[in-house]
Image (spheres, helix red, strand yellow):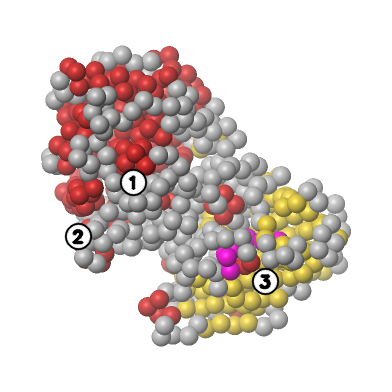
Amino acid sequence: MRTADLPIKNNKLQTKRDVEQALKQIGDPVRPFYSKGFAKLHIGNTSASFPDSVAEMEGFSRLLWGLVPLLAGGEDYDLWDLHLEGIKNGTNPLHEEYWGEINDYDQRIVEMAAFGVALALIPDKIWDPLSKEEKDNLTTWLQQVNDHPVHDCNWLFFRVLVNLGLKKIGESYDAQRMEKDLDRIEQFYLGDGWYADGVNAHVDYYIPFAIHYYSLFYAKLMKDDDPERAKRYKDRASMFADQFVYWFAKDGSAIPYGRSLTYRFAQSAFWSAMVFAEVEGSFSYGVMKGLILNNLRWWFQQPIFKRDGSLTVGYRYPNLIMGEGYNSSGSPYWALKTFLILALTKEHPFWQSEELPLPPLHEKSVQHSPHLVLYRQEEKNHVVAFNSGHLSTNNHAHTSAKYEKFAYSNFFGFSVPRAEWGLEQGAFDSMLALSEGDNIYRVKRKSEETKIEGSIIHSKWMPWFDVEVNTWIIPGSPWHIRIHRIVTERYLDTAEGGFALGLENEYFENQAIDKVQNEMNTLARFPWGVSGIRSIYGNGKPKLIYPNSNTNLIHSRTVIPTVTNEINQGVHWLVSAVFGEPGLDTGKWNTPPKVEIVNDKIIVHSENGEHIRFQKDMKAVIK
């Protein structure tokens, strides 16, 4: 079967029955992958940072995020019979498929959370059918979670959810540990509805599809036991929604940004949790219905499935290069968290509501907590997030690419390096890459300082101890301006990359690229999109870079308009104008923003020329 023939691609996703069917269309293909005792799923042959046996348990567990809501909402599914048998065997220390004793910071702690959710939502399906011995096995296995430390981030909620599930069935749980974990999560709160994923940590999709998702589940299940915290969680989620909605385009796509993007349609899991917890806030059930279903529709039309219908590691297409070290073949099924809406009966107002489009949104949204300024081109289905970067970093794969690029787009995506040699392997879209002439480039991994004033972004970063870069981004769409002041004790090659434009195979073989290139400009133009860059100051040499295949998250083959330069020791200024939008260029390429260099001042004018957006004295001390 070709992926184009998969039944899910013809699912209109209009009714609850359609969404139930979609869950089954995702679940049915995994049937051949169950182990003999049904406690593990062997979906593929690639590995993660934990043992393969744990990865197989992970795949089993992650199906629960969809199966449990389906059953809670009153629908039957015979795949549950396999899972129930697997639960009995996986928690039985005498069975050959026993999931084992867990260790500190164990991946199985992550997967236990789904069992807490199941105990809370469907005790009649997972708890009541068990014998006394089987119940003892399950609780004993789950209670291990209270004896081991977890990572100081969203992982704390896994322990909370397990204890919540045990509490709901009247079994022994650790109320003190639960309270301590919730108090620690409180320290991650930044304000305006935003959390970080830990103290001084990154802000990314783990906020909507993890911290808010779990807190809303808690708010719904604990509204009588812990009403004050439940209300606080709902209020924060409502505030967060007012900004998070800007991450989505009207066609259902969303901005790829940060790590764990192989969870794909978990992008809309936050909205499902809002509906589940019955938090309308600024958005009606009809609007949230549109957000969820449009996101699912967009994803189900992408080549994210194998021919057998199982999910792959990757983003818009199968791609191990962009994956995390903890991504096993079963990891992508965390996306099923979005199916939480199935826990609602068909009579619920959500399912009775008319699906509505996105409400009118502002062209610009300044979001200080995630360090982003978002611009929208509604008529183009284009959303761009301009990024100041972070004051800290982490050891996850491709951190610089996932958190420190200057811009992230739902249409252009972003690229990760394939290897360390040169611009083609580095795939440096929306970045300034620096090399000591050895063809090995460094980029921004973290910032020393960041600031958003109005909508102007500033960051200071140091790729070497004796090289300091101050970067200003003047956001906009389709044009934005980048200004760099480089103070260096080294001779450097520089490369300023624009957006990565996809070379769509069905067109590329028969249609030559339309490109413009001269001393100041380089442009790539196809019927589906335009990407270009202009060197305004710094004697840059524009060129088109063709990165290695499979470096971009959305397009498997791309071209990146780039400005290169060579600079000596000393102080240097580089100024570029970057262009990018879907569809054929409407002539805006020929009307770039007005940027002047007058009396050692850089002046960026507004689009209509009525005021100055940015001005910097090139001789002044940088603060």
Q: Earlier in the sequence, mark 3 or mark 1?
A: 1
Give the residue type that dot 3 points to: Val
Q: Which residue is mark 2?
A: 7
- Residue at point 73%, 73% (across, down): 540
Q: Does residue 221 appear in the picture of this structure?
A: no
Residue 433 colored in magenta in the image: yes
- Residue at point 63%, 71% (across, down): 562
Image location (x, y in percent) of residue 170: 25, 15
Magenta stretch?
424-434
Q: CA distance from mark 2 to mark 3?
A: 45 Å
Q: Which residue is mark 1?
A: 330
Label 3 with label 1: CB-CB less than 8 Å: no
Image location (x, y in percent) of residue 533: 62, 72
Q: Nearer the viewer, residue 388 or 320?
A: 320
Q: Is residue 610 depicted above or below 77 in this figure?
A: below
Look at discs 2 and 1 and give the one toward the viewer.
1
Q: Is residue 109 depicted above or below 294 in this figure?
A: above
Identify the element where label 1 is drawn. Answer: loop
Number of the label disc, if any, that sits on residue 563? 3
Q: Is residue 411 depicted above or below 539 in this figure?
A: above
Give the residue type that dot 2 points to: Pro
Label 3 crowd bin: few (<14), some (14–19), many (20+), radius 10 Å: many
Q: CA distance from mark 3 to mark 1?
A: 41 Å
Label 2 crowd bin: few (<14), some (14–19), many (20+), radius 10 Å: some
